[in-house]
Amino acid sequence: MSKRAIVTGGSKGIGRAIVERLLRDGWSVCTCSRSEEGLRLMWEELERPGNLFYRACNVEDKRSAREFVNFCVEKLGKIDLLVNNAAMLGERKPIEDYTEEVWDEVIRVNINGLFYITKYALPYVERGGVIVNMSSGAGKRPAPYWGAYAVSKFGVEGFSMLLAEELRRKDIRVYALNPGATRTRMRAQAYPQEDPTKLKPAYLVADFLIKLINSNTPSGSSVDYNSI
Ligand SMILES: NC(=O)c1ccc[n+]([C@@H]2O[C@H](COP(=O)([O-])OP(=O)(O)OC[C@H]3O[C@@H](n4cnc5c(N)ncnc54)[C@H](OP(=O)(O)O)[C@@H]3O)[C@@H](O)[C@H]2O)c1
């Protein structure tokens, strides 16, 4: 497999761990987050790797998403791996109290963003390539009070299954990956009372993702962390 990857939301948390693992394995990686500053800081911390390309992008904005993908294609040529990782949590409230504006934003980022990045990247994804969409346990069984996040992750699951069917003839595999409880900013936001040191570090999710893409897990699978 050639080794050219796009990872969205790569400046922090699970996305960053995936970027770091791919770089260590010799991949060329293109990543984004909303903050140019955050990306630059990461690049500096990683000692300015020549195989890491980054650009600020808000995936909910179709123009920004298209410009980011164009930038990646300029740098990478073709794409062997797309990891749709960027997402936001929103509120943890019952539906009747959920704020309309927050609902809209979560759906725009977690669903529209997934669609835009995938749509723009697809013409460049090579035969034999892999797409991994970051899902959640909240997208697989009812999670009361997780509102738009839970609904969006059910959407990620559905989108992944549908895309897997469409791409079978092109020999491109698609997975929905539920990373499980992981020590990141988003998890701390969701569970402020929790002791983060009790949670697994993000690099274990990155290691599992590598195992997944190198496995013969059927395309269209919804995969939980450590389930293969
Ligand atoms: N952590 C867990 O326990 C857990 C459990 C289940 C599922 N997940 C899923 O795993 C994925 C990663 O989560 P995480 O915990 O690592 O989150 P995180 O720590 O909040 O990191 C999210 C990353 O995405 C970027 N981002 C956020 N909104 C964006 C946008 N609109 N456009 C572009 N980039 C954006 C963030 O950078 P900026 O803020 O600078 O934009 C950051 O780099 C998500 O899909 C999440 O739903 C996580």
Image (tube, helix red, strand yellow):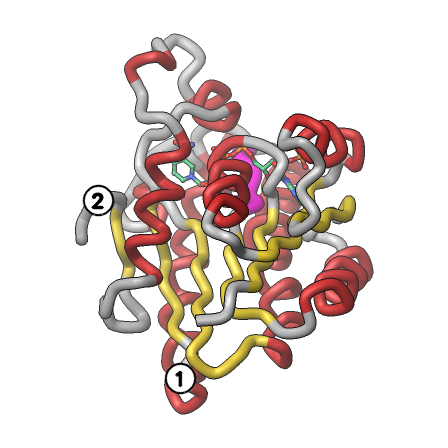
Give the residue displayed 67% in from the left and 31% down from the top. 47
Horizontal and vertical percent position of residue 15:
52, 41
Q: Is residue 138 visible?
A: no
Residue 221 is inside the magenta segment: no
Crowding near the residue tagged with mark 2, few <14, some 14–19, many ≥20 C-alpha atoms within 10 Å: some
Say if disc 1 is inside 8 Å of ligand 1: no
Give the residue displayed 63% in from the left and 70% down from the top. 121
Give the residue displayed 41% in from the left and 32% down from the top. 202
Give the residue displayed 79% in from the left and 56% down from the top. 64
Camera-nearest residue between 186 and 9: 9
Left or right placement of residue 60 versus residue 185 in this view: right
- Residue on which the image places disc 1: 171
Residue at the outermost left position: 228
Q: Is residue 12 visible?
A: yes
Q: Which residues are magenta?
A: 86-90
Q: CA distance from mark 1 to mark 2?
A: 25 Å
Q: Quadrant of residue 70?
A: bottom right
Horizontal and vertical percent position of residue 167:
44, 82
Amino acid type, callout 2:
Asn
Image marks 1 and 2: residues in contact by CB distance under 8 Å: no
Crowding near the residue tagged with mark 1, few <14, some 14–19, many ≥20 C-alpha atoms within 10 Å: some
Marking on residue 130: none
Horizontal and vertical percent position of residue 48:
71, 37
Amino acid type, callout 1:
Asp
| On screen, residue 61 above or below 47 | below
Mark sitting earlier along the chain (1/2): 1
Horizontal and vertical percent position of residue 66:
76, 65
Camera-nearest residue between 63 and 98: 63
Residue 88 is inside the magenta segment: yes
* Secondary structure category for the residue under label 2: loop
- Residue on which the image places disc 2: 226
